Amino acid sequence: MSATAPKSSEDVASLNREKAQLRRAAIVILLIGLISGGLLYWLRTENSNLDQIRESQAHAESRQMQLLYGRSGGLTSDLSNLFSRPGPQALLIIGISVALAGACFYLGQPIPETEDDAADEVAK
């Protein structure tokens, strides 16, 4: 048994309860991320005429940035314009929430209760 391993079954049970809370938090993070990303996309894509006007203005601004600041200015302007549209914003929100939820699920994996279970887990 290593120095960081829990010493009794009460410690293991307590740690598993905390890990279960972490898994529940991951579910909440995932649901909030998916709902907010979908809601943002749905609400912001209703007026397509305004988006067409913004797109043409963004293209003109991007061209001006390339003339003034070179290729890096153009790339910076293109990236800024990309994240001002609702589709990439929604994907970014969903991607971040999926990454956070995945990290919580990974950290919330239950600990095997006996040493035989731990040996089986290592053998896999």
Image (cartoon, rainbow, N blue to C red):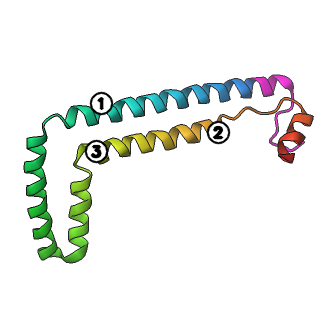
Q: Residues within 10 Å of mark 1 (few under 14, many from 20)?
A: few
Under circle 3, the secondary element is helix
Image coordinates of residue 76 in percent, x first then y, are: 25, 65
- Could you tell me which residue is drawn at 13 percent across and 57 percent down? 58
Q: Nearer the viewer, mark 3 or mark 2?
A: 3
Residue at numbered disc 3: 87
**Amino acid at pointer 3:** Gly
Marks 3 and 2, the one that precedes in the sequence:
3
Most frequent secondary structure within the magenta stretch: loop
As drawn, the residue found furthest toward the right would be 116
Would you identify the image quadrant in which residue 19 lies? top right
**Amino acid at pointer 1:** Leu
Image coordinates of residue 47 in percent, x first then y, are: 12, 36
Q: Is residue 57 magenta?
A: no
Residue at numbered disc 2: 107
Magenta region, residue range: 1-13
Marks 2 and 1, the one that precedes in the sequence:
1
Mark 2–mark 1 CB contact (< 8 Å): no
Q: Quadrant of the N terminus?
A: top right
Q: How many marks?
A: 3
Residue at numbered disc 1: 39
> Compared to 81, does 120 lie above or below?
above
Image coordinates of residue 52 in percent, x first then y, are: 10, 48
Q: Residues within 10 Å of mark 3 (few under 14, many from 20)?
A: some
- Give the Cα separation between the discs numbered 2 and 1: 29 Å
